Image: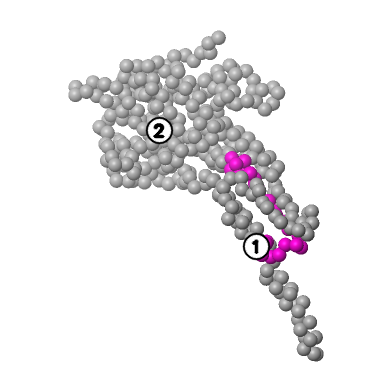
C-alpha cells in the first residue's frame, strides 16, 4: 500500500475520532436550588434524654413551632379551636383572657401547656401566668420545672416547686411530656409547603421545568456551541434566558429549537399534591372546612355551617374545655369557667 493510500484510508477514522471527542451531549441544571423542607427531624422518636437537671421532650419543640405556619390548613384549624375556646372563656381576676389564649395555643401546638402560680409573701395567689411550652422543661424528679432558652445569654431558671400546672396530651411511649394529636399530619403539612415553595420558584424562574436546546444547524462550529453552553451555565437569577442573540448567516429555520419539559404536567401535579395534603391535615384536626374559610369545589357545597359548628363544638370543643378545667382541681377553686357556645342570629 502506498503512502498516499495509507493517509487517505486513515483520514476518515481520524476525523470520526476528532468529531467524537469534540461533540457530545451534556445535561446540566441552572438557577437556584428548589427549597424543600425535608431536614426537619421532628418525628425521630427517642426516649426523653436527660440534659443537666431536666428532661428533653421526645420531639423538637422548635420544629413544631416552625411547622405551625408551614401550611394554611395546619395553622387555621388550630386558630379556630383557640379562638372559640378564648371567646367562650369567662375572664377571672387571676387569669386574663390574653393569658388564657396563650395557654390554649401552647396546648394545641405542643401538646403541653404550663401555668405558673405567682404568689405574694403570705402565700396568696397574685396571678396565673402561662410559661412558654417551647422553653419549659420538666425536672428529673418530675416535680420541678425549668425555663431553658438554648443559645441565649440567660441562665436556666428553676420555678418554685409546686408553682407549675402542667396540662399535657398523653403519649403512648412516655409519661414525661405530652405530644399533639396532629403529629401524623406533619409530613403532609411539609409536603404542602414544599409544593407551594416549588410552585413559587416554578413561576418566578420563567423557564419553569427547563428545556432542551436542540441545535442541528451545520453553520455552527464547535467553538460557538461551547460559548452558548458556557453562557447558559453561567446565567443565574430569575427570568434568565429571556433574550439570546444568535447569528447564523446560512442557518436553517429549524436549525435551533427550544423544547420545553413537562410544563403542563408540573402544574397538574401541584394541584393534586395540594389537595391530597390538605385532606390529610383536615382529617387530623377534625375541623369543618366551612369554619376555616375554605371554598367548596363542588356545586352542593359543604352543607349547613351551623349544624357543622354545633357538631364540632359537641365532639371537640367540650372535650378541650373539660381538659382545661383541670386547673380548678389543681387550685382547689373554680377559676376556669366557660359560657355556652351559641350562634347569634
**Nearest the camera: 233 or 297?**
233
Q: Is residue 114 visible?
A: yes
- Is residue 220 a member of the stretch shown in magenta? yes
Instruction: Quarter of the image for the N terminus: give it.
Output: bottom right
Q: Quadrant of residue 165?
A: top left
Residue at image point 32% right, 39% down = 148
**Going by the picture, which residue comes out furthest to the front?**
249
| Left or right: 90 as drawn, with respect to 34 | left
Q: Residues within 10 Å of mark 2 (few under 14, many from 20)?
A: many
Q: Position of residue 304 (x, y in %)?
A: 62, 18
Instruction: Quarter of the image for the C terminus: give it.
Output: top right
Residue at image point 54% right, 40% down = 190
Q: Quadrant of residue 24?
A: bottom right
Residue at image point 51% right, 37% down = 70
Q: Which residue is mark 2?
A: 112
Q: Is disc 1 placed on a helix, strand or loop? A: helix
Q: Residues within 10 Å of mark 1 (few under 14, many from 20)?
A: few
Q: Of discs 1 and 2, which sits in the foreground? A: 1
Q: Which residue is mark 1?
A: 226
Q: Quadrant of residue 71?
A: top right
Name above or below for residue 100 compared with residue 25: above
Residue at image point 69% right, 44% down = 263
- Is residue 140 a member of the stretch shown in magenta? no
Name above or below for residue 250 compared with residue 148: below
Task: Find the magenta span and give its range.
Answer: 200-225
Q: Is disc 2 placed on a helix, strand or loop? A: strand
Amino acid at each position: 500500500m502506498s503512502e498516499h493510500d495509507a493517509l487517505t484510508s486513515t483520514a476518515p477514522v481520524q476525523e470520526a475520532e476528532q468529531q467524537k471527542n469534540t461533540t457530545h451531549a451534556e445535561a446540566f441544571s441552572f438557577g437556584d436550588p428548589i427549597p424543600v423542607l425535608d431536614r426537619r427531624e421532628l418525628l425521630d422518636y427517642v426516649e426523653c434524654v436527660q440534659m443537666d437537671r431536666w428532661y428533653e421532650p421526645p420531639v423538637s419543640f422548635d420544629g413544631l413551632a416552625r411547622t405551625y405556619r408551614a401550611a394554611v390548613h395546619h395553622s387555621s384549624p388550630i386558630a379556630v379551636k383557640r379562638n372559640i375556646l378564648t371567646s367562650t372563656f369567662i375572664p377571672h381576676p387571676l387569669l386574663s383572657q390574653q393569658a388564657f389564649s396563650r395557654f390554649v395555643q401552647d396546648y394545641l401546638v405542643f401538646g403541653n401547656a404550663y401555668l405558673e402560680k405567682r404568689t405574694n409573701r403570705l402565700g396568696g395567689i397574685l396571678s396565673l401566668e402561662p410559661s412558654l411550652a417551647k422553653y419549659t422543661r420538666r425536672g428529673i424528679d418530675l416535680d420541678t420545672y425549668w425555663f431553658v432558652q438554648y443559645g441565649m445569654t440567660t441562665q436556666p431558671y428553676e420555678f418554685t416547686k409546686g408553682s407549675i400546672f402542667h396540662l399535657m396530651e398523653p403519649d403512648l411511649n412516655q409519661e414525661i411530656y405530652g405530644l399533639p394529636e396532629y403529629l401524623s399530619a406533619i409530613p403532609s403539612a411539609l409536603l404542602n409547603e414544599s409544593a407551594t415553595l416549588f410552585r413559587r420558584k416554578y413561576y418566578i424562574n420563567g423557564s419553569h421545568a427547563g428545556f432542551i436546546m436542540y441545535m442541528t444547524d451545520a453553520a455552527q462550529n464547535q467553538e460557538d456551541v461551547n460559548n452558548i453552553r458556557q453562557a447558559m451555565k453561567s446565567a443565574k437569577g430569575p427570568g434568565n434566558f429571556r433574550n439570546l442573540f444568535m447569528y447564523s448567516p446560512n442557518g436553517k429555520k429549524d436549525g435551533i429549537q427550544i423544547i420545553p419539559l413537562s410544563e403542563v404536567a408540573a402544574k397538574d401535579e401541584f394541584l393534586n399534591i395540594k389537595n391530597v395534603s390538605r385532606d390529610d391535615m383536615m382529617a387530623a384536626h377534625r375541623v369543618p372546612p366551612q369554619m376555616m374559610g375554605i371554598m367548596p369545589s363542588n356545586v352542593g357545597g359543604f352543607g349547613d355551617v351551623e349544624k357543622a359548628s354545633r357538631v364540632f363544638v359537641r365532639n371537640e370543643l367540650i372535650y378541650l374545655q373539660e381538659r382545661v378545667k383541670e386547673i380548678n382541681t389543681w387550685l382547689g377553686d373554680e377559676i376556669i369557667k366557660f359560657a355556652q357556645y351559641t350562634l347569634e342570629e
